[in-house]
Amino acid sequence: MRDRRAPSRLPTRLSRLTSRRRRPLAVLWLLLLVVAGWQAAPLPGLLSGGGWYVPGSGSAVAAERLTDGFDGRGATSLTLVIEDTRHRAGDPAFEARVRGAAGAVLGDDTLRASGGYGYTTLTGDRARAAFLGDDDRTALVRVGSELDDGTARRLLPGIQDRLSRQYEPQGLRVSLVSQAALWGEVNHLSERGLILAELVTLPLILLVLLLLFRSVAAALAALLVGVSSVVFALAVLALVARHTELSVFVQNAATMLGLGVGVDYSLFMIMRFKSELPAGGGPLSREDRERALARTLRTSGETVVASGITIVAAMSTLFLVDLSVIQSMALGVVVVVAFSVLTSVLLLPVLLHLLGSRIEWGRIGRRPANTARSGGGWVGVTHAVMRRPVLFLVVGVAALSALALPALRLDTFTPDARVVPADAAVRQGYDTARDEFGVGGAAPVQVVVESRVPLQERSGADVAKLLRFHDTVAGLPGVVRTDSAFGTLRQAGQDRPFAVLAALDRLPADARGTVGHFVSGDGRTTVIEVVGDDTASSGSVRDLLTSVRAEAAGFAAGGGGWSVDVGGETAEGVDANKVIEDRLVPVIATMLAVIYLLLLLTFRSLFLPLKAIAMNLLSVGATYGVLVLVFQDGLGAELFGFDVDGHLTNFVPVLLVTLLFSLSTDYEVFLLSRVREDHLATGDDIGSVARGMSATMPLISGAAVLMVAVFAAFAFTGILPMQQLGLGMALAIALDATVIRLLIVPASMRLMSRWNWWLPGRKPAPGPPHVPEPAPATEMAGMERTTHK
């Protein structure tokens, strides 16, 4: 029954190396940490709020075509929202103040504006009325900037701060509204939220570690490993961000997962090392330290490596999703988990050699009784569950299924301005534009029509076809209005409206401004902006987008050298959702196959991996259900301080499913490896479960508390997408460590009995048919997952 495979010599060699070179290696560790911290410092300024465009999609092509050749548009396009709280339109003071603010923005050297179109650039009352709000206090100006998207995201928050400081004392609210401005603010808030989360998380982690270890030295050592993992990972991400686009969310995700996983791994390692030290607490010889650490590396070290491989393999499946925001977050998690493994098995041994028996320095309170010897409360709970396995299995599954029911209403979309607080300038500008110019005016559907030849050279039949297309789109259900150059051109040339483009200088200034904003300088491309009756993420505007795209496809399919691309915020979100949905099944299938194979090789059982996957699916479903209740339905919205917008951020569910399967599998292997070890030694199908539970659940619970503390801190301090991810992770880990580990696992294993370990071609080991009385369990040495067999 026992595995007679010879143990690997690598742990012994590594233990000896770190023992004999511990001081130089410790100095090297500190030097690398300082260099990595210096390297990681610029990371926030290198991150992008982009990554939502699907390469080659209609929204991406439309956005690219609008970056050059139009007045009031550019590499970055913004909407300048000016609200005068003291004067109204018609008052000379209102005109002067609005023109002064708009002139300051258009003349800002940092912004590098390429032109403007709107209230202050037009002269006719009728033309200007379209850019004056219903309150007669708000004016809009479309501004094009030469700044590329990444640079704009970096600079716009500073420009906005200057405008706010200058004009708010004068009673003017001047806001720059755009995707670049929004994501620049998100980056700023993300960095600030990260600092706040760290201020909350680090003391909380230290407190939990002190309660678990009951010694200051051990707690600080575990915390140092977690922090080192994060710093090293952020340094690598900063190097990558200099050469490729990484999402602004990658820093939060890497820090959140790095602290949780890094401290978790060091917890396993240190707890095992302490248990391997000779009893008595006296001075240790070098041989004692080397022997204890070799055993630690051979057991907990292999556990950490196996866990890291599982998480990295599962997260790597996200690279199948062709969306930069998801791929960059997957990269962040892969890098930080890899460094968590490396610091735990390479750098932590150096620290353990230096500390030796001093790992118990700063002992707090009395050492807790070793409940592992007598079985403690865990054995009692396990036996209670295993005496009535059907009842507890039904209760556990029913509870998780009930929580999962709201997940049937799960709806996702890309974030809009509501992800930032209501007092942020970009949010105030967004809300003002929505209230005063219509809810759909803040994010119109953009129809970009490109002609093979200049529009003025088109035949009368071609022009009539284009005009019919415009009128059809304008008449679709849900359309409030369309903004384009068509009305101006029809007035100027009723028979051949586009012929006017050959003599634009003959048109009035207002007409030239309108044409220049909606028709490219080469006369080949024109834009139709379709304003819907709701927000960009609403169901009605998504339906409108579908109708517009259907009409565009029919128009382009008719021949004549026309191409049509439909973009805008709604199109961007729909295209991103589609690529996620299209790749979700391959991602999950690949991930499940990887996890099944890893568990099959670890446990040499056909059914245990299937059980683990089924439990994880229940846990994920329950987590999704709670997120729907909180973030779609608004349950507890005031507690979290966010606005309910009816959907989850679209990367959250797919990221959650990979992370949760990774971490839940980690706990599964941790627990079942210990059960299998006992089963191999005793052949007891049922008693091994109880003894494995008693040996591992204290440490599983401690690790879960750490994870929940880290993730919950981000749920309450981060921006909205990180709140969703943080709450989902905290909830899933809590469910996994309680309902699943305490109820479903022992109940299901009791019912499966000897079939737990069945593998074709191998007879199941005979075991006692009854639940044995609590037997002495192993010491704390068994309180971690052991992959060595």
Image: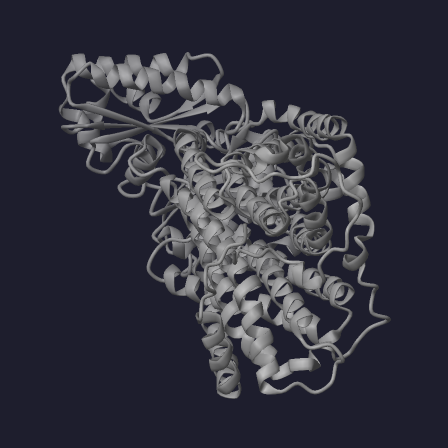
Residue 56: percent from left, percent from top: 28, 35
Q: Residue drawn 37% across and 16% down? A: 473
Q: Count the marks: how many?
A: 0
Q: Nearer the viewer, residue 98 or 226?
A: 226
Residue 139: percent from left, percent from top: 53, 38
Q: Nearer the viewer, residue 415 or 395?
A: 395
Residue 73 in which image quadrant: top left
Residue 402: percent from left, percent from top: 70, 25
Q: How is the image coloured?
A: one colour
Q: Is 197 on the left or on the right of 367, as rendered?
A: left
Q: Residue drawn 49% across and 50% down? A: 311
Residue 146 makes an appearance in the image: yes
- Residue with the most extreme right position: 366
With respect to residue 17, does 514 lie above or below? above
With respect to residue 621, does 39 lie above or below? below
Residue 589: percent from left, percent from top: 42, 33
Q: Nearer the viewer, residue 596 or 105?
A: 596
Q: Is 199 on the left or on the right of 617, as rendered?
A: right
With respect to residue 591, does 495 lie above or below? above
Q: Residue drawn 72% across and 66% down? A: 206
Residue 174 makes an appearance in the image: no
Q: Is 68 on the left or on the right of 625, as rendered?
A: left
